[in-house]
């Protein structure tokens, strides 16, 4: 009989795999639990649109159910969706992807990222990732047996990853550069010039780039450049995108991967064994979004932009210095002036003023000293949150 | 810039100059100046509120009246429209395409008074060939706002 360290009989041999044990537990679980126990909180901690999916998209899905669209779809997604997507990528970025072999419909970008990592990584392969970054990047690399190599990014550089910093971390084991711009949690955007430099680094060292462009449509006063559209980058880029943010469709879980025939085939192989296909209802909704969702997106982006200007100015005014984010729907102010860690700040702010923000440390070591404030919430709530935060900051800076 | 300001005001006329300044990234003084000019140029006609009068038990009768008109020489529909819109009961007057020409929205206290207005004021106007009166039975959506409850966004308190 196996005995645990406490002398209790053990039911299984080491039930949890070593690989999973390597994943760092979410450090802010305690904060989340605290938040869940509280009422009437103004939350700037929600990473999704506050808009409901536009009615024409919901209506298309309802009508498809009425017609009996309830079956599996092909593994790679409904042909009509792949065709619409191919047209969309052509129209937006002048990129020609073959709908039959170079596109895969996934269950959100989350699945796309997991598939991409598992398709390309061998044990010990290194993946270069900006820090701070979206929470699942390094975990997906670890799950696929790879080694994340974090590249710090700084407020002084608007949290843009530096091509030189990437290059200095390249070793014989480096296989992939993984970036996600516009960025969660910082709102940073990489302009075409910087992306071109990153593309050059990738070409010079024969690396793949996985580019998470889920926030592509949410940019303000700047054009989104698709990494794959840069010269010679289409074949070495795995482009990940989706419908959640641009069309307020988070709960539908529809994303896509676009890349070379070889890589998409490999990803499809994993997808077919582990997921089979994305939900048909979501795929039908996504077709409608691509066909006529542009106007709703434009309207939402205009609204986000107004809120963005209000929150960035507001945060700077109350003593939380914040660079101007040009994308996504996050502001990432520095809270260093309060002398608190980001987790402490978030916890105290929640208890004392009932405002929820996400500690920057949740997004990596270099997110410490910052908090993520999502402005996908009503202007009235943003203004109220700012006035509570002002009181909070004044109180704690005085100490 | 003025278009951005107008869009904000059209959605919420109570948005303050200071708020608009923050929302558009424009100095307050500049916003105030642009609004004043728009009022002067009658780009902004008035500031109003959308009210669900039923909830306060106020009885109002609304009627949409189709008016078929014989256009007059030289002036077309405009002079007949003017004779109609001068009446204060006519809240809204549009020239429309289709089987009739003018759409008149009339608001009054009782059906009787609306009927009187149509039969004694509107129908006898020279050039008016005929009218069809539709009494409004229920308002579902007004100026982009649904009257019965708003769609509630139910989000998780925090997501990464």
Image (cartoon, grey):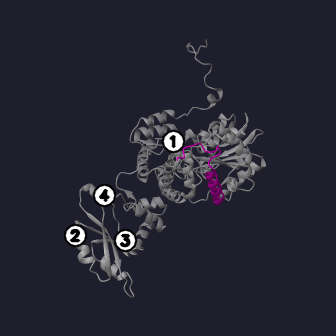
- CA neighbours of label 4 inside 10 A, class few (<14), some (14 to 19), many (20+): some
Image coords of residue B142 (percent x, y): 36, 60
Reading the image, the residue beneath label 3 is B45
Disc number placed over residue B159 in the picture, else none: 1
Q: Quadrant of residue A17?
A: top right
Reading the image, the residue beneath label 4 is B52
Which quadrant would the N terminus of chain A be assigned to in this image? top right
Secondary structure beneath label 2:
helix
Q: Nearer the viewer, residue A307 or A106?
A: A106
Residues behind callouts 1 and 4 on a single chain: yes
Residues behind callouts 3 and 1 on a single chain: yes
Residue A355 covered by magenta stretch: no
- CA neighbours of label 1 inside 10 A, class few (<14), some (14 to 19), many (20+): few
Residues behind callouts 2 and 4 on a single chain: yes
Image coords of residue A164 (percent x, y): 72, 48
First-in-chain label (3 vs 1): 3
Relative placement, left or right, of B72 versus A113 is left
First-in-chain label (4 vs 3): 3
Chain letter belonging to callout 1: B
Chain letter belonging to callout 3: B
Asked whether the viewer can see residue A333, the reply is no
Mark 2 → mark 1, Cα distance in angstroms: 57 Å
**In the rendered structure, which segment of residues is drawn in magenta?**
A68-92
Residues behind callouts 3 and 2 on a single chain: yes
């Amino acid at each position: 009989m196996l005995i645990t360290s406490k002398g209790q009989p053990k039911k299984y041999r080491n039930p949890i795999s070593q690989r999973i044990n390597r994943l760092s537990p979410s450090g802010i679980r305690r904060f989340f639990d605290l938040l869940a126990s509280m009422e009437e909180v103004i939350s700037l901690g929600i990473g999704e649109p506050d808009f409901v999916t536009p009615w024409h998209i919901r209506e298309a899905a309802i009508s498809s159910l009425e017609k009996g669209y309830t079956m599996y779809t092909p593994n790679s997604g409904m042909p009509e969706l792949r065709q619409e997507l191919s047209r969309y990528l052509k129209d937006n970025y002048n990129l020609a992807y073959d709908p039959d072999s170079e596109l895969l419909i996934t269950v959100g970008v989350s699945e796309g990222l997991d598939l991409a990592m598992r398709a390309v990584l061998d044990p010990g392969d290194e993946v270069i990732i900006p820090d701070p970054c979206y929470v699942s990047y390094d975990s997906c690399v670890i799950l696929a047996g790879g080694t994340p190599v974090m590249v710090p990014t700084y407020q002084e550089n608007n949290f843009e990853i530096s091509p030189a910093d990437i290059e200095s971390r390249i070793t014989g084991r480096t296989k992939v550069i993984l970036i996600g711009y516009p960025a969660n949690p910082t709102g940073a955007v990489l302009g075409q010039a910087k992306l071109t430099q990153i593309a050059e680094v990738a070409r010079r060292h024969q690396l793949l780039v996985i580019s998470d462009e889920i926030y592509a449509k949410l940019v303000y006063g700047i054009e989104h450049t698709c990494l794959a559209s840069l010269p010679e980058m289409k074949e070495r880029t795995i482009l990940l995108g989706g419908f959640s943010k641009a069309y307020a469709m988070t709960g539908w879980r529809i994303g896509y991967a676009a890349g070379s025939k070889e890589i998409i085939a490999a990803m499809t192989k994993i997808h077919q064994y582990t997921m089979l296909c994305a939900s048909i209802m979501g795929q039908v909704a996504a077709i409608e979004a691509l066909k006529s969702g542009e106007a709703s997106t434009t309207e939402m982006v205009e609204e986000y932009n107004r809120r963005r200007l209000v929150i960035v100015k507001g945060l700077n005014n109350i003593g939380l210095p914040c660079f101007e984010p040009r994308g996504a729907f996050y502001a990432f102010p520095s809270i260093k002036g309060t002398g608190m860690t980001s987790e402490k700040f978030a916890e105290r702010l929640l208890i004392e003023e009932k405002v929820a923000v996400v500690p920057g440390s949740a997004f990596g070591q270099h997110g410490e000293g910052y908090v993520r404030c999502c402005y996908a919430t009503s202007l009235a709530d943003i203004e109220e949150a700012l006035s509570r935060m002002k009181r909070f900051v004044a109180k704690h800076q005085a100490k | 810039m003025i278009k951005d300001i107008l869009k904000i005001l059209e959605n919420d006329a109570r948005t303050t100059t200071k708020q608009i300044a923050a929302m558009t990234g424009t100095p307050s003084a500049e916003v105030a100046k642009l609004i004043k000019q728009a009022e002067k140029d009658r780009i902004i006609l008035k500031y109003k509120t959308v009210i669900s009068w039923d909830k306060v038990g106020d009885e109002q009768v609304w009627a949409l009246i189709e008016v078929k008109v014989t256009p007059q020489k030289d002036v077309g529909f405009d002079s007949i429209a003017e004779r109609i819109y001068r009446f204060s009961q006519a809240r809204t007057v549009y020239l429309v395409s289709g089987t009739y020409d003018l759409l008149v929205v009339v608001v009054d206290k009782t059906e009787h008074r609306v009927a009187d207005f149509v039969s004694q004021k509107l129908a006898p106007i020279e050039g008016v060939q005929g009218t069809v009166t539709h009494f409004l039975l229920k308002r579902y959506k007004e100026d982009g706002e649904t009257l019965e409850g708003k769609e509630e966004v139910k989000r998780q308190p925090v997501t990464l």
